[in-house]
Amino acid sequence: MKAVYSPLHSRHDGGMELHRGELVPCYEMPRRADYILAAIEAAGLETLPPRPFTLETVLKVHDAAFVTFLRTAFDQWKAIGKDGFMLPSGFAARSMRQDVIPPGINGKLGYYCYDAGTPIVEGTWDAVLASAHCALTAAALVADGERSAYALCRPPGHHAGASTYGGYCFLNNAAIAAQYLRDHGSARVVVLDVDYHHGNGTQDIFWSREDVMTVSVHGSPETEYPFFRGFADERGEGKGEGFCHNFPLPRGTGWDEYSATLDQALAVIRDYAPDAVVISLGVDTYENDPISAFTLGQQHYPLIGAKIATLGLPTVFVQEGGYAVADIGTNVANVLTGFEQ
Ligand code: Q9C
Ligand code: ZN
């Protein structure tokens, strides 16, 4: 399997997140990608740089004003004399107006962002765009006939909605890959999200669409981030009704229950009979993950890959979460080699 990687990911660094009442360095750090790169190279994957792309596909899944905000946010921050990292000071929650886009940068942050854990720094846009280009390149490889490809995306993407960001995510790399596949020969695409957290951004983007099904297996939002999405009764709307499937699982879930649930998710995908699948590949389901609470061991990741391979579909793997830095590379490489066997 070919892998797509850009060193520009390291430009997104130095931000702090509000985590359980404390401002701490982001768990989503550049070293994550260094470990993954080392492990996939050791596993024999050939690594390519991303190809150049226009914003065409990005703008099919994201609002144009939102993309402009992401591109220019740090410049606006500097223009008011600030530096370092950007976090919002207030959110457009229930009692607030939803129809006003604040003209100032502090207001805009609260309009587009939905948590205090996703800082923007000077290099964030460069990394975000390179990350999206990694996903697009992997999608292009598969659209051109490869059985599978892996995008080493950093920052991750699955929490980014059409016009919202959070959960360490800015542009939705998996959604962008799925849209690219739709535009290059696949009539139906599934995004299967196996990150520990619900893929709320991907669900938001395809909520009213029947041509891209979203399926997510994750820690229950009753106790886990993003808290307000990812319940089993969320099924899509309008033309998209019935094309969204959520499988929330409790804290402490281990391999037996996880693998049975993944089998159910795969059965839903088989029924839909897609032409291609995008995997939102988080390995924060790992027992030693510092912010998650499933108990999967290293030995289970090849089995996840092998299960995904039973779909027999063209497959684009897109990197999402995983914060047990020392083992993240091994776990990712194990999924990919398990898929290839
Ligand atoms: N510390 C992914 O795995 N933490 N995102 C929120 C702030 C959010 C995880 C609380 C965890 C997001 C891609
Ligand atoms: Zn996650």
Image (tube, rainbow, N blue to C red):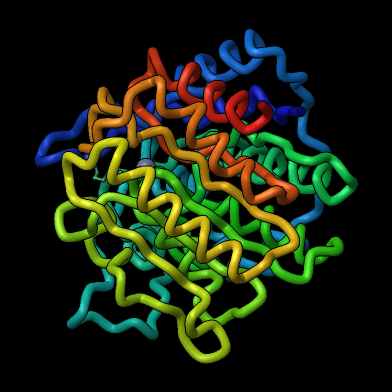
Residue 71 seen by the camera? no
If the picture is divided into quarters, which one holds ligand 1? Answer: top left
- Residue found 77% across the figure and 62% down from its top: 56
Q: Which of 78 and 12 is in front in this view?
A: 12
Q: Classify residue 82 by image quadrant.
A: top left
Percent position of residue 313, x then y: 72, 51
Residue at the extreme right: 144
What is the number of callouts on the image?
A: 0
Q: Classify residue 300 by image quadrant.
A: top left
- Residue found 43% across the figure and 68% down from its top: 245
Relative to 138, is 299 on the left or the right?
left
- Residue found 39% across the figure and 85% down from its top: 99
Q: Which of 213 and 299 is in front in this view?
A: 299
Percent position of residue 170, x then y: 49, 50
Residue 258 seen by the camera? yes
Residue at the extreme top: 42
Question: Vertically, is 52 above or below 6?
Answer: below
Looking at the rendered image, the quarter that the N terminus falls into is top right
Question: Vertically, is 326 above or below 155?
Answer: above
Percent position of residue 314, x then y: 75, 48
- Residue found 41% across the figure and 33% down from its top: 283
Percent position of residue 46, x then y: 77, 19
Question: Vertically, is 245 above or below 216?
Answer: below
Relative to 25, is 206 on the left or the right?
right
Relative to 223, is 209 on the left or the right?
right
